Amino acid sequence: MVFLGTPLAAVPALRALAETADVALVVTRPDRRRGRSGRKTPSDVKRSALELGLATACPTDRIELEEALETVGPFRLGVVVAYGMLLTRSMLERAESGFVNVHFSLLPRWRGASPVAAAIRAGDAVTGVSLMRVTEGLDSGPVLAAATHPIAERDTRGGLTERLSHLGADLLVDNLAGAISGELAGTPQHETDATYAPRLSAGDARLDFTRPAQELARQVRAMSPRPGAFAWWGETRMRILESRWSPEAPTPLDAGGLDLVGGGLWCGAGSGALVLEVVQPAGRRPMRGADWARGVRGGLGRLSGVGPSQS
């Protein structure tokens, strides 16, 4: 078999597959420069593949991906988990039993690159994992199997993704034989029910305090741990890493206004208010919001979704 995946969320499926089948090749995205040193580091999947003693390939484009698949020769099944590149028909035809994809949503809801963040931000009560037959479209193939998982009030994207990654690994192994034999025909997706979760951008993490506090709290959870929701305090960029919302503040606060009350740092919103539990001012470590507020000289001022260069 051939496995295609990149982030940490794909590692449980790779390890489960390696215990069950002969993985001839692991395909992942190229090493990337990370951190202040700018040193190139491999993806989580590549690190795990090397630990398992598996052959790896890191194509930069579809031409190199096609060439990498050619080196394997005929193979039985391809497995894709958050790889990061769409496959062409000629690639899909290289696997005798086709390709399957472990996707972290209940398809057809939240197709695309950031399904977990989208589910949290939308306020979904339930999400899950789908095992899907890969076609040329974006997450549009027949669903072979699915498993549901509740979304708790305090779930973050990082924590929920970790749990879904293990759920997806189990789903893959439990249905592997059926996917290979063709016994799992799959259920076609209804296009009218499809929703999309595009790749996260910097704008997705910016907080607009004219919006309801409940929506802002979900946005903070959806952006945690990375890239981290943010706003500006004067000319300082402030990441909001943990928060909770309340229908009302203990003192009158306009949108973005800050106040330290009852041991909590409160922030006004379009309706309701946020308690900023963990914040990270630029150039500093994460800290409790109340501790940051106690160290501020003068008034606390306000947070804004508009930076100094945009005002």
Image (spheres, helix red, strand yellow):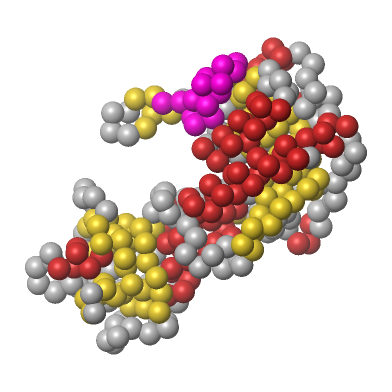
Q: Does the magenta stretch include residue 197?
A: no
Q: State whether residue 184 is above or below residue 99.
A: below
Q: Residue 5 vs residue 132: left or right?
A: left
Q: State whether residue 176 is above or below residue 40.
A: below
Examine the image and state in which quarter residue 22 appears: top right
Q: Residue at x 79, y 57 (%)?
A: 191
Relative depth, front residue between 34 and 138: 34
Relative depth, front residue between 32 and 160: 160
- Residue 68 rendering spot, x and y as whole percentages: 65, 17
Relative depth, front residue between 290 and 220: 290
- Residue 49 rendering spot, x and y as whole percentages: 56, 23
Q: State whether residue 57 is above or below residue 186.
A: above
Q: Is residue 50 magenta?
A: yes
Q: Could you tell me if residue 36 is visible in this image?
A: yes
- Residue 153 rendering spot, x and y as whole percentages: 51, 68
Q: Which residue is drawn at 76% across and 40% down?
A: 174
Q: Residue 311 vs residue 149: left or right?
A: left
Q: State whether residue 179 is above or below residue 47.
A: below
Q: Residue at x 76, y 62 (%)?
A: 193
Examine the image and state in which quarter residue 102 appears: top right
Q: Which residue is drawn at 60% across and 49% down?
A: 164
Which stretch did the figure color magenta?
Answer: 41-55
Q: Quadrant of the N terminus?
A: top right
Q: Could you tell me if residue 196 is visible in this image?
A: no
